[in-house]
Image: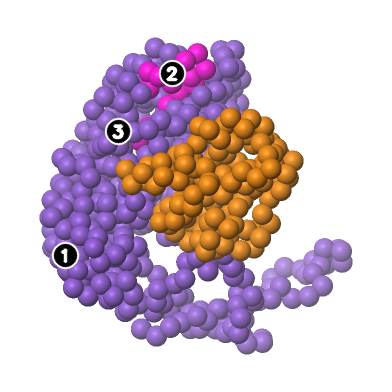
Amino acid sequence: MKTPKGLYYAETHEWVKVEDGFGYVGISDYAQHSLGEVVYVELPEENDHVTKDTEFGAVESVKAASDLMAPVSGVVVAINDDLEDSPELINEDPYENWMIKVELEDPSEIERLMNAEEYSAFCEE
Amino acid sequence: MSYYDTLIFDLSTHARKGYTLPKRTFKRQALPTHLLREDCPGLPEVSEVEVVRHYTNVSMKNFGIETGMYPLGSCTMKYNPKINQDLANLPSFSALHPYQPTRTVQGMLKLLDDLQSYLSEISGLARYTLNSYAGAHGELIGLMIMKRYFESRGEHHRVNIIVPDAAHGTNPASAVVAGFKVIEVPSEKDGSVSVEVLKGVVDENLAGIMLTNPNTLGMFEKDILNVAELIHDHGGLLYYDGANLNPILGKVRPGDMGFDIMHINLHKTFSTPHGGGGPGSGPVGVAEHLVPFLPKPLIKKVDNTYHIERDNETTLGQISHFYGNVGVAMKAYTYILSNGKEHLPEVAKFAVLNANYVKESLKDLFELPVEGVCKHEFVFNGLKDKSTGVTTLDVAKRLLDFGVHPPTIYFPLLYKEALMIEPVETESKQTLDRFIEVMRVIAKEAKETPEVVKGAPHNTIVKRLDEALAARQPVVKYTDIPK
């Protein structure tokens, strides 16, 4: 299971990559593996506001539909359109294929997330 | 069996007829031209034998309860006795029209009224409406009744419905559609709800709780009386999802457990064809204080005559055409009477016995997360030995090769490899033994020749399907199939 360093992870298996005050959000390798083949990704619209620990979308696999929980709060400045037609990208590379780009409202939220090491340990529990 | 994928439209030959109409004895009436079609409706033109062969071939593609064992958890796929069908087919009932004057349909109204009172007696609730079409529809109606009840008391702030995480997916969906907010609570190891956890979420905004009992793992909620007390003390109502009524039939009554509203899946517990075999019916029952909110029309008996009550001030309004799926109600009525008060509890007894027999006979090879006596169903968390990578999906597909319908898989979401088995009371010991034998063979194959299980099914007309591709690029129109 891949858990790249430098990203921040939530207990609900989303990751955030911070760049210039923006956060790219996706789901972890562990999450895509547990879900199985992803068949649909539902994302918010640009300019929507997402709030930490609340639902911002959903992923559907052949097994189940799961809510996506925002690991950070802020306005969505971009969404990854490719996922609409090619949801399988999530399985192919869950870290390359981010879902939403958020303008971080409260950078301290990041500190409450796990680092790669902590997240790996969390998944093993 | 060869592959049959012909549509009846493919069989059509221009001007072929399978019928002759009697000579016209009335005068031709000219319709206004703007009402006339411009071209033919494109109906298939086929002979009787073509129709019969076509549908016989199509029916052979299907797997039903009349083909083999169907241990689909949470669905109660019991055999549907033919006497049900016989009664529902009687022309004195089946030829009725819902717009007939009530004095000409007294027999039918009596039947429906009697069925309501049987359901009341069975469940311990004051009164039923038969008007809802299916279980999920019943849930929605039940919650709308709840909503109306709180509105009538001016308690508009009561919007929270508690739903355990192991609940049937329809529960939270119905609550949201009815305008409530869902508060999900984690369930205990055995799928039950904890009074302590509930204490943390009940407040002045509580509207109610939705539960099945026995729960999704087939275990009886032992704390149900304490749960009911807690919810009622906080001004809330209890909703009972009747999907799991079969194992308590004639033994315990939801009304006595403290539930205020429930729906019954007539098509499950009371043996009418469902799951692609026929329509459902989800009568909703309520306790005395909620009767005024039941949807219309209601049947009312006054001085030995049955009337149809269409209006009262508090009713929810009309939620279906006429009285719901009356044909299904008639089959359930027949089932209840043909078993009788004395024998209905045996349904529960054998449903529970069969489930426990299968569970105990397989738990050495399949992982059983919750030990102990279950009710009508139980959940394995896949194979005990997962070293060869054979999943629950593979086991389910392999069962098809042995002529057994797979159990419910990947539900509830409490376990990664959930395999939910409900054998029901109508299967004989021989059939259960064969199922056990087949499951044991598959577990052995999973260890010794895992590729056989992973590649299953091998003996069916259609082999393993690419479910992800089907979901990503669905072809839902015949004309869109690539030739």
In the structure shown, which secondary structural element does the residue marked by tag 1 occupy? helix
- Between B175 and B379, the one lying in front of the other is B379
The chain under label 1 reads B
The chain that hosts pointer 3 is: B
Count of numbered badges drawn on the protein = 3
Residue pointed to by mark 2: B202
Image x and y of residue B80, in percent: 31, 56
Do tags 1 and 3 sit on the same chain?
yes
The circle drawn on residue B440 is 1
Q: B191 above or below B268? A: above
Q: Earlier in the sequence, mark 1 or mark 3?
A: 3
Q: Work out how far the residue at label 2 is from the one at label 3, CA to CA, in angstroms.
A: 18 Å
Q: For the N terminus of chain B, which image quadrant?
A: bottom left
Q: How would you rate the neighbour count of disc 1 (Cα within 10 Å): few for under 14, some for 14-19, many for 20 or more? A: some
What residue is rendered at 13% in x and 55% in y?
Answer: B364
**Viewer-side residue, B140 vs B307:** B140
Which residue corresponds to mark 3? B188
Magenta highlight range? B198-213
Q: Position of residue B254 (x, y in %)?
A: 32, 28
Q: Secondary structure at mark 2?
A: loop
